[in-house]
Structure formats: structure tokens, C-alpha cells
Image (spheres, rainbow, N blue to C red):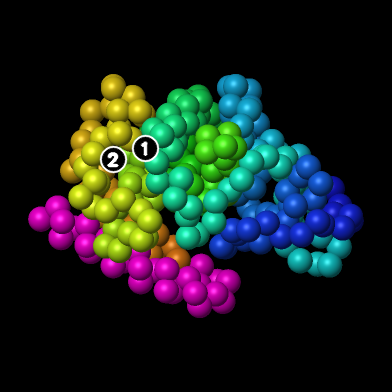
Amino acid sequence: MKHLGEELDGPLSGGNMNMVYRAGDTVVRDAGPWTPTVHRYLSYLHLAGIDWVPRPIAIMSNPSGEPEQERLSYVPGDVPAYPLPDWVWSDDVIREGAQRLRRLHDASLGFASDGAIWQSPTKIPAEVICHNDFAPHNLAFCDGRIVGAIDFDFCSPGPRLWDIAYFATRTVPLGANPAENAPGMDQARRRVQLILDAYGDDLVIGWDDVVRVSVIRLHDLADLSRQKAEELHKSHLLDEARAYDHDGHYLAALRR
């Protein structure tokens, strides 16, 4: 266990459920019981050749008596904040994002989960380690190209489709009220197919599978937001929960 003593450069944007601070070429954030497992997994990804994710450095005690903190390497690049810029909605971004997601999933095969503690519950079938928040707000870009992925705090075992469906909700996007600069639902089928084609032609799923799991995924996010709103005393998360539920009901009606 190491000790956190130096000054931090300042908070980074995002950090909806956990404040994230830049400290030189590293990032510092609150740790939890799941942090050793996440660090072990990130090290495993680097061994598997995925060098565009954070490298774990240390878990540190906090002299102020606050929760322990973790230190990770800083992934350079621009991480877009909401409202997302126009270029995020390009076909190239969702293609490249799907390809990166496939690489992450494939690299997780063989990870030893004995004794693992995850912040997010394991889902079945546990085919791969899911990122569980793979979306533009957790991707680093340079000149419109994806150069890294961050925020593995909620990763846990689950089916490939669990991550694919969430990525689709954020990038297609799938929902009742897309942002004004985002593609409309009239383009949704085409853009979902772009994701599936880019992820890999051996994936035997289609539009209805993605929408079906997206409905479940959105209601799951709503439940998580309500839980974190109570734990962290952040009332804005209740607004997010209502939005997730609304989109989930919209997609369910669309399937019918």
C-alpha cells in the first residue's frame, strides 16, 4: 500500500460517479474492494497486447482518512463530454469503436477470475470481461480517431452482447429523444448493422437481439443510477434513471 502525498493537477471532466484527478502523467481516483481485481485485469490486457488502456500503478492510502485511492497511467487524447460533438456521430467512429470493443473482449479470454471482486454484477453467459460503460465518454480520441479506452471501474464478466447493446444505445443512438445533432431512429437499423459488421462476421446476432438487450441494459442502468443516487447523495442521478427507464420503455414499444 502506498501513500498519496503530492498535489493533484485538478479534476478531469466526466467522473459522474467517481471524481477523477490528473496528477502529471497519471490519474488518481477513489478505490473500492473491486480495485485490485480491475488492476489485475488491466495488467492482463497489457500482457495481451492492449496497450491503449490505463496501466495500473498503485493503490494508495489517503492521509485525510478518506477512502483509499488508485493511481493509473493517463491515457492521452481528447475524451468528449456531453453534449457530444458532431464528429462523434460519424460512421467511422462506430465502426472503429466496435472493432476496439471486439479486441478488448477477445483479449479478456483466459483471465483468471478466482477470488475476483467486481463492482458490477456478473451477467450470464460470462463469455468475456465486459467494460460495461464502453461509449464515447470513455474513449480517447486524436483527430477523430479512437486511441484509447478508459474507466474500467465497472468491468465484470458477461456476454459480448451486453457491451455491444450498450455501445449501440450510446452511439447509434437508441432512444426516444436523440440529441439534435445525432442521427435519428430512421438510421438506427443501418447503424446497428455497422456495429455488428465491424465487431465481426462470426457474431450471430441481429437488430432485434441488440434492441432486446438494450431494453434490459437501460433498465439495469436506471436501477444502478437510483442505487448510486442514494449511496452518493447525488440527486441528478435520479433524473438519469428516469431518462434510462423512458428510453427502455420506448425501445420495448418499438420491438412490439
Residue 91: mark in rendering:
1
Q: Which SS class for mark 1? A: helix
**Label 2 sits on what residue type?**
Arg
Element carrying mark 2: helix
Residue depicted at x 58% and y 27% = 50
Range shown magenta: 228-256
**For the image shown, how many numbered marks are present on the structure?**
2
- In the rendered structure, the answer to whether residue 193 lies left or right of residue 43 reads left
Q: From the image, tell me which residue sits under label 2.
A: 191
Question: Which residue type does callout 1 highlight?
Answer: Asp
- Seen in the picture, residue 251 relative to 124 is either above or below; the reply is below
Name which residue lies at 23% across and 33% down. 205
- What's the residue at 46%, 45% (across, down)? 87
Image x and y of residue 101, in percent? 45, 34
Q: Are marks 2 and 1 in contact (CB under 8 Å)?
A: yes
Judge whether residue 172 can be spotted in this image: yes
Residue 33 at x, y = what percent?
63, 53
Q: Few, some or many C-alpha atoms within 10 Å of disc 1 (few <14, some 14-19, many ≥20)?
A: some
Q: Is residue 195 above or below residue 27?
A: above
The residue lying at 39 percent from left, 68 percent from top is 241
